[in-house]
Amino acid sequence: MSPLPSDAVLSELRAVDGLVGRLLAARAALRSNRLIAPLDVAIHRERFLQAWEEGEPFDPQFRYAEPEKANDELEAIRCEAATAGGPWHRLVADEAERSLEAHLAHIRHDAEHITRISAAEYGTPDAALLGDALALLAAPAPVVPDELRRSLDAARASAVMTAVLAAEGLDGWSTRLVDGSAALMSVNGSRRLISIRADAHFTVQQLVRLTVHEIGTHVFRWANAERGPLVLGLRLSGNTGTEEGLGAWHEQHFAAAFPPDRRFALRVVAVHAALRSGFTDVVRALVPHTDVRSAFDITVRVKRGLPDTGAPGGFLKDHVYLGGLRAVERHLRDRPGDHRTLMTVKWPLHRLALLDGLDMATALPGPLRLPDKALAQRARTLATVEA
């Protein structure tokens, strides 16, 4: 069966614009990830580090924000899409149901529920990936030139990122400093926002990598998807591994980031340990490879959402950075032409076949934003001046 021409594919995609727009708004209104971000992580960090020094570490009991008023819109979207028929409506129905399930898990703060839902979305690290991670951690650290080892605080990092956004013509995007975040830096596409942890410090090299990863991948993908039907920007199930793997792939190709960031390997070790043990034992699994403060912060990421962090399980996302990189490497080695498609949708690798009939380069209006070495050099220049 020959593929449909591009205009026919776009017409089919636009047929679900109304439902997709409602789904995007409903997801943004729920702010589910906010519900699993510990409110008191800074307090517990200092208590834990002191207890560790005294030989009496503990499993933190985190507090979380109360859920806001329930949003029934997701269920309404699921029902409407399911009864409409057609493959694109079924896809929207499936995504609405997935969002409902994840939101319920985040509200309940149940270790088994969060573990099951996140494992279904992100998978779990297998023996090969764990071996890959341990080999990376055992390898000698690369030599970094002195000018790239200079340290920048969060305010200076924010200024660099803001300048890069402006230079790229990304109007409407901004940065902000946030307290208590588990992540050093994150992108919220619906709010056109890059959040930077207020107490973080970055080397110049690290900030260059993050610029390529956060702006060159996450922000560019948002901007590119906005040129076409709304479903192109709908984060489909399984996208996180592709998204983060693509970001790591870009780091290697445009920020000279070889080998992969050690944090990616540490996160695989953390997820593997979290499936079997509580907070303190995850830290113990990490400290042979990093300092205890970093181990604490990595462990928070995999135990977020759990009030009792001594329970096995957790939020099993973080192994996808290294696992996604390996999957993207394999895919683009076999199908290098898919890179432009990947940069136009917020979809996982296994969904790209749905767009085989669409010529992205000519069918969508506006420029296709792609990361390159010039983006990395701009960040390096700005960061060096700021430093």
Image (spheres, rainbow, N blue to C red):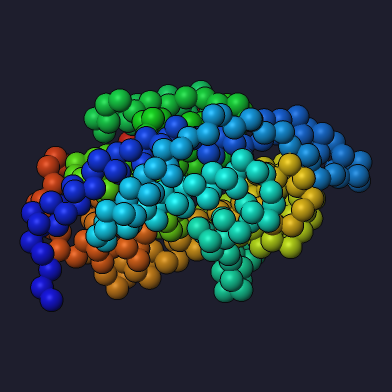
Q: Quadrant of the N terminus?
A: bottom left
* x then y, percent, for residue 117: 57, 56
* x then y, percent, for residue 259: 49, 59
Q: Residue at x 50, y 63 (%)?
A: 323
**Who is closer to the viewer here, 223 or 148?**
223
So how many labels did they put on this image? 0
* x then y, percent, for residue 299: 68, 48
Q: Residue at x 74, y 63 (%)?
A: 276
Task: Determine whether, in the image, residue 214 is placed left or right of residue 300.
Answer: left
Q: Residue at x 27, y 53 (%)?
A: 84
Q: Is residue 362 visible?
A: yes
**Who is closer to the viewer here, 276 or 99?**
99
Residue 172, picture quadrant: top left
Residue 210, picture quadrant: top left
Asked if residue 327 is positioned above or below residue 345 in the image, the reply reads below
Q: Residue at x 38, y 70 (%)?
A: 330
Asked if residue 334 is positioned above or below residue 114 in the image, the reply reads below
Q: Is residue 338 visible?
A: no
**Who is closer to the viewer here, 92 or 214?**
92
**Who is closer to the viewer here, 161 or 42?**
42
Task: Determine whether, in the image, residue 158 is placed left or right of residue 68.
Answer: left
* Residue at the outermost front position: 83
* x then y, percent, for residue 30: 48, 35
